[in-house]
Image (spheres, rainbow, N blue to C red):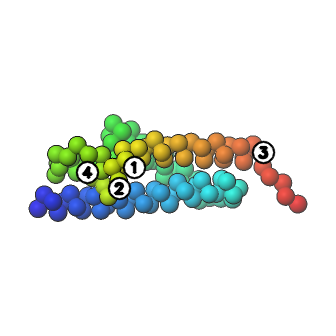
Amino acid sequence: MKNRELLVIKSVHSIIWLFFNMVIFYLLYAVIADTIDKWVWVCIGLIVAEGIVLLAFKWLCPLTVMARKFSDSTKDNFDIFLPNWLARHTKLIYTSIFGGSILILIYRLVFPLHIN
């Protein structure tokens, strides 16, 4: 039964990870393409909400905390279907992409393109 619960957590965690990939890469695409719309702001809100959740759980995903009950593994990917190196560096990679996207967004808002 222990393996089944861990499998469910890993599956849900992986689906949420994929969802946030779509969110962050849509944000990056939108600011590069200068197609700032309501979805850009929705993406930012979702990412900020995720950051608040991580902050509340001492920089751990709540699913990681749950999965810990079912595994003693020391691997970074024990709770998600990702390569270990990617699980280890996900926060750094995606925080950098988000930060870059925000900088581009600020640039786009301060210096809008005027195409006539």
Residue highlighted by disc 4: 78
> Which labelled disc corresponds to residue 111?
3
Measure how far apart labels 1 and 4 are at the Cα level: 12 Å
> Which labelled disc corresponds to residue 86?
1
Q: Is residue 90 above or below residue 36?
A: above
39 horizontally vs 81: left or right: right
Residue visible at 42% across and 47% down in the picture: 90
2 horizontally vs 104: left or right: left
User: In the picture, residue 102 is in which quadrant?
Assistant: top right
- Marks 2 and 3: CB-CB under 8 Å? no
Q: Residues within 10 Å of mark 4 (few under 14, many from 20)?
A: many
Q: Is residue 91 above or below residue 8?
A: above
Question: Going by the picture, which residue comes out furthest to the right?
Answer: 116
The amino acid beneath tag 3 is Phe
Mark 2 or 3: the one toward you? 2
Measure how far apart labels 4 and 2 are at the Cα level: 9 Å
Question: Going by the picture, which residue comes out furthest to the top?
Answer: 58
In the image, residue 72 lies at what x, y percent?
A: 16, 45
The amino acid beneath tag 2 is Leu
Measure how far apart labels 1 and 2 are at the Cα level: 6 Å
- Marks 1 and 4: CB-CB under 8 Å? no
Residue highlighted by disc 2: 82
- The quadrant of the rendering that contains the N terminus is bottom left
| Mark closer to the chain start, 3 or 4 | 4
- Marks 1 and 2: CB-CB under 8 Å? yes
| Mark closer to the chain start, 2 or 3 | 2
For the residue labelled by badge 3, is the local secondary structure a helix, a strand or a loop?
loop
Q: Is residue 35 above or below residue 72?
A: below
For the residue labelled by badge 1, is the local secondary structure a helix, a strand or a loop?
helix
Measure how far apart labels 1 and 3 are at the Cα level: 35 Å
- The quadrant of the rendering that contains the C terminus is bottom right
The amino acid beneath tag 4 is Phe
